[in-house]
Image (cartoon, rainbow, N blue to C red):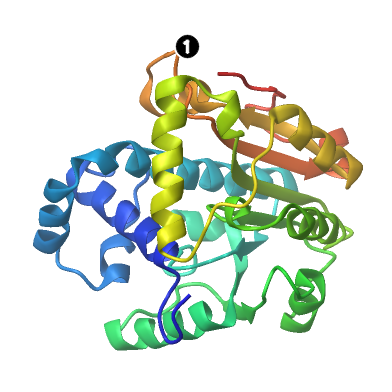
Amino acid sequence: MIPGKPSRTAWSAAMHRAAHQIVDRASVFDDPMAVPMTGWSRRRIEQDVARHPERRGMRFFIASRHQFARDVVRRAAERAGDPVQVVVLGAGLDTTAYRGGPESDDVVRVFEVDHPATGAWKREHLTREGIFPTLPVAYVGVDFETQSVHAALQSAGLDPARPVVVVWLGVLVYLTRPAIEATVSELSGLATAPVDLVFDYPEPTEDLSGRVAQVRAARASRVAALGEPWLSSYTPEEMRCLLADRGFAAVEDLATADWIERYFGVRRPAAGAGAHLLHAVTGAARRSGSGPGRRTRAGSN
């Protein structure tokens, strides 16, 4: 990470979300703030997409994981009968607190948790671009490898009596396993009310087919060259056990073929990028039901 700059991967994810609005006409994830958040013009984004057609798959994955998170927030609010708190871990240029619209009715407050350098850059960027929150938002600086997420959120005013949805997208792969496991343990105790957790994770490269493994390895090399190497991956069974040992039960674990079918209406049994979208919830909410669409899937390629 370069001082005074955002994470390079956080910036890349923001650009994919913006490009999805323009090039794909927001076919999966509609986000009116995605383009303004980048500070780039629509024309400049279109030109960037034209130069990099190989990014299309990643763009669709990022759009899908954000819609998946939005669906979880909506169902959690329906289950609670009240707006929920949303914690965005590794917030980057996430737009949850700035989008407005009907989905704001599901959220009472947003907590943006990120490395202090990225959080500081984002606040300066928002001021420069004239972007203001449409929801109450707290900015919480945390180094996941060395600091307690639970303690930081308590200090920032998280209400343990109100349901919480934790959105943790595009982050696990960059953390060590001990940091991931410690963070999940802390998240399960964030509130006496239900805690929903939504995140993505990759399967080990060695478990993937030849061509997919080659693409994955090439992508890992590119981000490592940016100073943000991939550090962790899990099999679905390993992830299920990690969650269960720390008080969470998996509600949905969508493998690549599953989320392609859900968000694109196409069933591709051979799809094997090894990218999972997972929703888990603490025990009390699981016992009371998680709303429409509840199911548990191990997922497979």
From this view, report whether residue 66 is shown above or below residue 252. below
Is residue 165 found left or right of 67 in the rendered image?
A: right
Asked where in the image residue 29 lies, by quadrant, the reply is top left
Q: Nearer the viewer, residue 117 or 2?
A: 2
**What residue is at 68 percent from the left and 37 percent from the top?**
234
Is residue 297 found left or right of 207 in the rendered image?
A: right
Q: Answer yes or no: is residue 292 visible.
A: no
Is residue 44 found left or right of 9 in the rendered image?
A: left
Label 1 sits on a secondary structure element that is loop
| x and y, in percent, of residue 279 in the image | 67, 39
The amino acid marked with disc number 1 is Pro
Q: Nearer the viewer, residue 36 or 83?
A: 36
**What residue is at 41 percent from the left and 31 percent from the top?**
214
Q: Answer yes or no: is residue 16 visible.
A: yes
Marks counted in the figure total 1
Residue beneath label 1, please? 269
From this view, report whether residue 120 is shown above or below residue 269. below
Label 1 packing within 10 angstroms: few (<14), some (14-19), many (20+): few
| x and y, in percent, of residue 13 in the image | 39, 56
**What residue is at 49 percent from the left and 68 percent from the top?**
97
From this view, report whether residue 112 is shown above or below residue 79. below
| x and y, in percent, of residue 131 in the image | 34, 79
Is residue 24 found left or right of 211 in the rendered image?
A: left
Q: Quadrant of the C terminus?
A: top right
**What residue is at 40 percent from the left and 88 percent from the top?**
124
| x and y, in percent, of residue 53 in the image | 19, 41
From this view, report whether residue 245 is shown above or below residue 140. above
